[in-house]
Image (tube, rainbow, N blue to C red):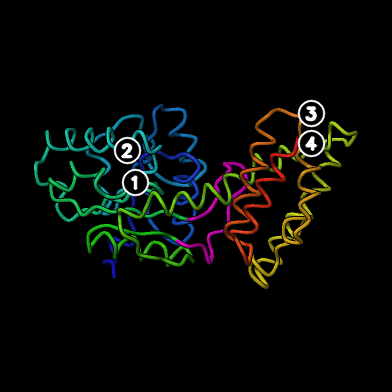
Amino acid sequence: MLSRCMARTVSIIGAGRVGKTLGKRLRGLGWRIGAVVTRSKATSRAAVRAIGAGTPASRLTGDVLAAEVILLATPDDALAGVAQALARTVRKTAGNAWRGKVVLHASGALDRTVLAPLARLGASTGSLHPMQTFSGVVMPRLNGITFAIEGDPKARRAARSIAKSLGGVPVIIAGRDKPAYHATAVLVAGSGFPLIESGVRILERIGFTRRRALETLLPLTRQMLDNIERIGPRAAWTGPIARGDYAVVAKHVRALRRYPREFRQSYAALALLAGRVLSKNPAVALGRLKRALADR
């Protein structure tokens, strides 16, 4: 478990969607928010207002070390640079300042090795990633959400404590598995956005208003998810491929010729994926699907 001090103090670097959400939830649980660092004074002040506490800052200084836990919620491609900058900044003032500190980043795809400059200075490093979508508009639920954690033993204990305090379910994974873990989020949730938008555009083209198109597709999507939750993907699977009605699949392919080629390509890729992971006889399903998808 974390010490009382550690469990109550956190600095946040990169207070975007994830950083603000986690900061606000932790503050509501009684955590003390230290430095809140973003790229500009305006955005750091806005982040502090959203979180409800913290000291805004637009550059990295030793002030982040007033907290025992430092959370890096920057974009993935900025993490390495931020870690290096933090190591340089604090090394100038106190070479052993990182000893005893826990540094966690919130990337889903990267592991603790991106924080190596801080680990070399004595910090405990790891990662804490909530498997949830953050829109920046709606505050997402965290209760029951999986938090993937990895890192050295002390960092894992800190990450586990944070996840549990937020109502999440901490799951330890190996650092090498993080890209595959994160790919599942993109495959399932990230792909849902363009799929629904493409469905809306097809319905708009045949005369639906945008509002009616969404009102048509969203209940369908919710029922699909409800069915999956109750009985699992394979048992809940419906549609022409599930029925073996490949003539309908060929008809869909012909209908989608009127739309940009990405529509057809996505339909074909998802049809083949369904045949591979949901069909009772993948070899037969894939053979018949390929013929239907090639229908001219």
Q: Which residue is mark 1?
A: 110
Q: Which image quarter holds the C terminus? A: top right
Marks 3 and 1 sit apart, C-alpha to C-alpha, by 40 Å
Q: Which residue is mark 3?
A: 258
Q: Residue at x 48, y 45 (%)?
A: 20
Q: Residues within 10 Å of mark 1 (few under 14, many from 20)?
A: many
Q: Which residue is mark 2?
A: 79
Residue 283 percent across, percent down from the top left: 59, 59
Q: Amino acid at mark 2?
A: Leu
Q: Nearer the viewer, residue 154 or 181?
A: 181
Pick whichever of labels 4 and 1 is earlier in the sequence.
Answer: 1
Pick whichever of labels 3 and 2 is earlier in the sequence.
Answer: 2
Q: Which image quarter holds the N terminus? A: bottom left
Q: Amino acid at mark 1?
A: Leu
Q: Residue at x 17, y 48 (%)?
A: 119
Marks 3 and 2 sit apart, C-alpha to C-alpha, by 43 Å
Q: To which quarter of the image does residue 267 belong?
A: top right
Q: Is residue 100 above or below residue 254?
A: below
Tell me if label 1 and label 2 are in contact, CB under 8 Å: yes
Q: Residue at x 58, y 49 (%)?
A: 189
Q: Amino acid at mark 4?
A: Arg
Left or right, 203 with reference to 280: right
Marks 2 and 4 sit apart, C-alpha to C-alpha, by 46 Å
Residue 111 percent across, percent down from the top left: 30, 49
Tell me if label 2 and label 4 are in contact, CB under 8 Å: no
Residue 277 percent across, percent down from the top left: 58, 60
* Magenta stretch encompasses residue 195: no
What are the residue bounds of the magenta stretch?
131-146
Q: Which residue is mark 4?
A: 254
Secondary structure beneath label 2: helix
